[in-house]
Structures are given as structure tokens and as C-alpha cells.
Image: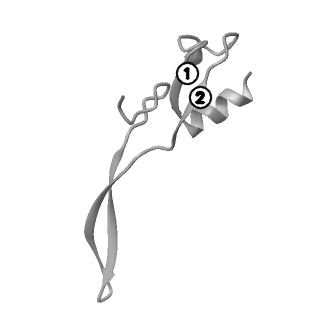
Amino acid sequence: MAKKCQICEKKGMLVWRLLKLRGKYHPTIKKRKYPNLQWVRIPIDVKQKTYRKFAGKRILACTKCIKTLSKRK
């Protein structure tokens, strides 16, 4: 399974780490950052359209999607 949120399809992105050297910034290290994915069980009686196709299933979702899901139960 990919490191990707199944609801909003957020995935890893490449980030430059800037290092200050002699008063100037130098892009030195490229690093891949991944979203904070958690296993969550979507309730069967979910009302929001984006979550309906996952109703009753256990999926990997980012914490932002989990937060909005808990607000609209």
C-alpha cells in the first residue's frame, strides 16, 4: 500500500533543507516528507459524500481528514 491518504490523496513531497553559510542560504539536503497517516475505521452511517465510498471500511487517512471526519459524524 502506498504512503498516500486514501481520502484526499495527499502524498509525500520533496523538501529542501536550507543551511546558512557565511550569511547566505545554501540548499543542501533534499528530504522526502510524508503525511501523518493513521489507520481509521469509517462508520457505516457517515453522511458526508467524500467519506461514503469508504463507509464501514478501515483505511489509511491523514490526520487532517480524520479531524474533519470526527467533526461531522
Describe the element under mark 1 as helix, strand or loop: strand
Residue at x 26%, y 69% (from the top left corner)? 27
- Quadrant of residue 46 within the rendered picture: top right
Mark 2 near mark 1, Cβ–Cβ under 8 Å? Answer: yes
Q: CA distance from mark 2 to mark 1?
A: 6 Å
Around disc 2, counting alpha carbons within 10 Å, would you say few (fewer than 14), some (14 to 19), or many (20 or more)?
some
Secondary structure beneath dot 2 equals strand
Left or right: residue 42 versus residue 15 is right
Image height check: is 62 above or below 25?
above
Q: Residue 11: x, y in percent? A: 39, 38
Relative to 42, does residue 31 appear above or below in the rendering?
below
Q: Nearer the viewer, residue 71 or 57?
A: 57
- The residue depicted at 65 percent of the width and 31 percent of the height is 68
Amino acid type, callout 2 = Val
Q: Quadrant of the C terminus?
A: top right
Query: Are there few (<14), some (14-19), or many (20+) residues within 10 Å of tag 1?
Result: few
Q: Position of residue 24 (x, y in %)?
A: 30, 81
Mark closest to the chain's N terminus, 2 or 1: 2
Q: What type is the residue that disc 1 sits on?
A: Arg
- The label shown at residue 40 is 2
Q: Residue under label 1, please give it.
A: 58
In percent of width and height, residue 51 lies at 58, 17
Q: Position of residue 41 (x, y in %)?
A: 61, 23
